[in-house]
Image (cartoon, rainbow, N blue to C red):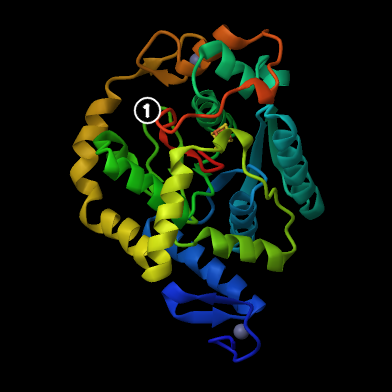
Amino acid sequence: MKCTVCRGPAVIDLRRHNANFCGEHLLKFCRDQVAKAIHDHKMIEPGEKVLVAVSGGKDSLALWDILVELGYQVEGMTIGLGIGEYSTHSTAMTVAFAEDRGLPLHHVDLREDYGYDVPTAARVTRRVPCSACGLSKRHLFDKTALDGGFDVVATGHNLDDEAAVLLGNTLHWQTEYLGRQLPVLPATDGFPRKVKPLVRLSERETAAYCVIRGIDYVVEECPMAEGNRHLRYKEALNLIEAGSPGSKHDFYFGFLARAADRFQPEAAEAKGALGACERCGAPTPDTLCAFCRLVERTAGHDPVPVELIRKPRSRGARAGAGSGKQ
Ligand code: Q46
Ligand code: ZN
Ligand code: ZN
């Protein structure tokens, strides 16, 4: 197998692009795809400050690395979720990545800084762990971005994630979510802009990028993700992609080009009018925002071991959870 560009030995075949690449040209391919996504969707302007949400997995570390390589002004942020060894390992990987490269990293720990963790919140609220986890991540990334004067928050959602979430949202016709499933969410009402620069790359490509760049990442899935339907949608799409390369790309980018606009009114309507949380100032339709209510309810409870939290049932978790990022 030869590299399509230089005819040297290839390390990966990308059937949907009808191409094989050597290590060097795979790295170039990944950077070019990210640059194209940023350009096509007007994600980041030159000179803007970018906060990257980092989990310690392959996607967020590859994203951070690529944005630095492309010359953006980037800082990382990671959140200690308290999900047993998975969280310990994830944080250690992220800290090591930042220290090895001398990159700035913001680190918030739910237990140390707010008095709760994801398993405990799941037990106290009697909801699936991904619910409290996603809420915490969204709130804290937004807060850090706004407090730190960042223009944009970048997350590591890749093509597999977006296609799987789109499949879930379409199967169940969650039109409000369809209206928000965009690679760029503009800054509004006290929320920073959110962008997904990896939407043109598959998870196989980001994993290969990390291996070739020598980036150590957390390989294991979050133990709370087991059994959630997002993973099953990925498996179903992988079967389709194997028989028909390019299907995920066509599904997702076809949606963006031909259908996403149609769901904007429902997304806007669902958002409603927002005021400011009287405790933290975050935008909310209520007196207290959902994050402050979560902290009020869960802070100070003794930590609940991960093993005691039941796995999300198939209908329990919202599509989109369990992808390793929010
Ligand atoms: S980390 Fe958190 Fe994911 Fe684990 S608890 Fe669910 S949401 S699965 S992206
Ligand atoms: Zn090559
Ligand atoms: Zn609040």
**Which percent across, then down, holds residue 210?**
67, 61
Query: In terms of depth relative to the viewer, which is nearer, 135 or 101?
Result: 135
Against 108, residue 31 (above or below) is: below
Q: Is the shortest distance between ligand 3 and the CB of mark 1 under 8 Å?
A: no
Q: Quadrant of the N terminus?
A: bottom right
Q: Name the side, left or right, on which 73 lies relative to 314.
A: right
| Tag 1 residue | 189
Residue under the image location 44 percent in, 40 percent down: 229
The answer to which of 91 and 282 lies nearer the viewer is 91
Residue at 41% x, 21% y: name it.
Answer: 283
Left or right of 245? Residue 97 is right
- The quadrant holding residue 181 is top left
Q: Position of residue 295 (x, y in %)?
A: 57, 13
Residue 63 seen from this side: yes
* Vertical placement of residue 98 versus 200, above or below: above
Horizontal side of 248 relative to 64 (left or right) equals left
Q: Secondary structure at mark 1?
A: loop
Count of residue discs: 1
**Looking at the rendering, which quadrant does residue 216 occupy?**
bottom right
Q: Nearer the viewer, residue 90 or 85?
A: 85
